[in-house]
Amino acid sequence: MNKTHAILTLRHWDKKGKYVFTKHELAKLFPEDSSKTLTEGLNRLIKSGLLQHACRGIYVNKDAQSFDRFVIERIAKALRYGEYNYVSLESLLSEYGVISQIPIDRLTIMTTGRSGVYKTPYGIIEFTHTKRSIIDIINNTTIIDERPLRLATKATAWRDLKRVGRNTLLVNQEQLNND
């Protein structure tokens, strides 16, 4: 992997708004590299500060012009690509003002994929598996243009919190029932 070619490729994708990549995506962007050459090239890019290793198989162009405050959601989306994922539980209830504590270092996500916890330089991503149908997920979540992940409605986040057996004592019931 040529460093100059890598810089040009990353800039090209940055202009399109993409700055989080899976190793598989990077392999497609540099098809001339063997698996070993790609790994060595990625390590050189990390060492030189052009890329940041976020977690298992995920890389971030941290100097991208398109870099935004939703980097952790973009990493989560890349980790569970092909699954239905939505922000819920404590993270979203805090955004809705239903929980007074703000989880500053953790993003809680419901997923049709497997559960898991991933530590990244941008915070901890906690996936909790849901058996909800795709139709149910779509009907009980919303999309906000700039956000990469769907967001649970207030009622859905509350339902998820109870269903997975999390602490419900922090929830302000009065705020929960306000629209």
Image (cartoon, rainbow, N blue to C red):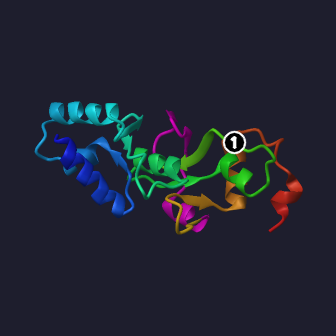
**Image location of residue 79, percent across then percent down:** 42, 44
- The quadrant holding residue 102 is top right
* Image quarter hosting the C terminus: bottom right
Place of residue 135 in the rendered image (x, y in percent of width and height, measured from the top left): 52, 65
Task: Identify residue for label 1.
Answer: 103
* Front position in the image: 17 or 118: 17
Magenta extent: 113-141
- At 39% from the left and 61% from the top, the residue drawn is 17
Q: On the picture, is 74 further left or further right than 124?
A: left
- Pick whichever, 113 or 52, lies toward us: 52
The reply to whether the magenta stretch includes residue 133 is yes
| Amino acid beneath label 1 | Pro
Corner quadrant of residue 50: top left
Q: Residues within 10 Å of mark 1 (few under 14, many from 20)?
A: some
Magenta span includes 86? no
Whether residue 130 is visible here, answered yes or no, is no
Residue 176 position within the rendered picture, expressed as x and y whole percent measured from the top left: 81, 58
**Residue 30 vs residue 162, the one in the foreground:** 30
In this rendering, position of residue 179 left or right of residue 124:
right
> Is residue 148 rendered to the left or right of residue 22?
right
The reply to whether residue 47 is in sight is: yes
